[in-house]
Image (cartoon, rainbow, N blue to C red):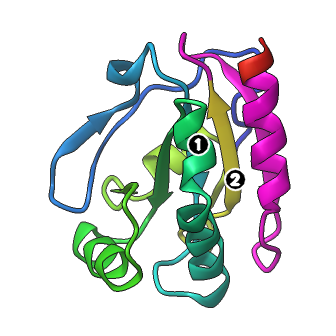
Amino acid sequence: MSAGPRVGDLAPDFTLVDTHGTPVTLSALRGTPVALVFVPFAFSGICTGELCELRDNLDAFDRAGVRLLAISCDAMFSLRAWAEQDGYTFDLLSDFWPHGQVARAYGVLDEERGLALRGSFLVDARGVLRWSVLNPRGQARDLAGYLRAIEALAAG
């Protein structure tokens, strides 16, 4: 695992494909705050629980104007099936190839296992990292942490 960006740094730019193969570029989203949520595996219990909780609370992100992007090292087709099964209306992005390149840039790639760790990042409208959290593989992230970070971002 490499060192990732720190709060106050410009967020590493990337382009990844969504579940339909459409490229999504972080820098193209400037002007909009973005929450990046790295997850280890599609369809796994904790990851599904986390994304379902985000799905069920998406209005908090929408009210704050924050675009939610979930990122996994899984292939685009797996992510599409997962999104369809669980009704995710936010983007799931595939960091499949080059494998884990974006997770590595954010310091959340488990090189030995080839998966993203549970890292989340809040990027402001100018592309600056304003909040981050990293949980161990078996520990879900707390929704309250996201909500506090979004509130702090909105407060300026």
Residue 1 position in % (x across, y down): 70, 52
Q: Give the residue drawn at x 26%, y 72%.
A: 80
Kindly report the distance in space between the C-alpha atoms of the residues bearing marks 1 and 2.
17 Å
Reply above or below: 144 against 33: below
Residue type, mark 1 in image: Phe
Residue type, mark 2 in image: Gly
Residue 83 position in % (x across, y down): 35, 73
Mark 1 Cα shell of 10 Å, populated few (<14), some (14-19), many (≥20): many
Residue 101 falls inside the magenta stretch: no
Can you tell which mark lies on residue 119? 2
From the viewer's perspective, is 130 left or right of 92?
Answer: right
- Dot 1 corresponds to which residue? 61
Mark 1 falls on what kind of element?
A: helix
Q: Give the residue drawn at x 78%, y 72%.
A: 140
Residue 94 visible in image: no
From the viewer's perspective, is 2 left or right of 90?
Answer: right
Residue 143 falls inside the magenta stretch: yes
Reply above or below: 126 against 146: above
Query: In which image quadrant can residue 137 be found?
Result: bottom right
Q: Give the residue drawn at x 82%, y 62%.
A: 142
Mark 2 Cα shell of 10 Å, populated few (<14), some (14-19), many (≥20): many
Query: In which image quadrant can residue 19 be found?
Result: bottom left
Residue 126 position in % (x across, y down): 54, 10
From the viewer's perspective, is 155 left or right of 59?
Answer: right
Please identify the quadrant where the C terminus is shown: top right
Reply above or below: 109 against 44: above
User: From which residue to which does the magenta span run?
Assistant: 124-153
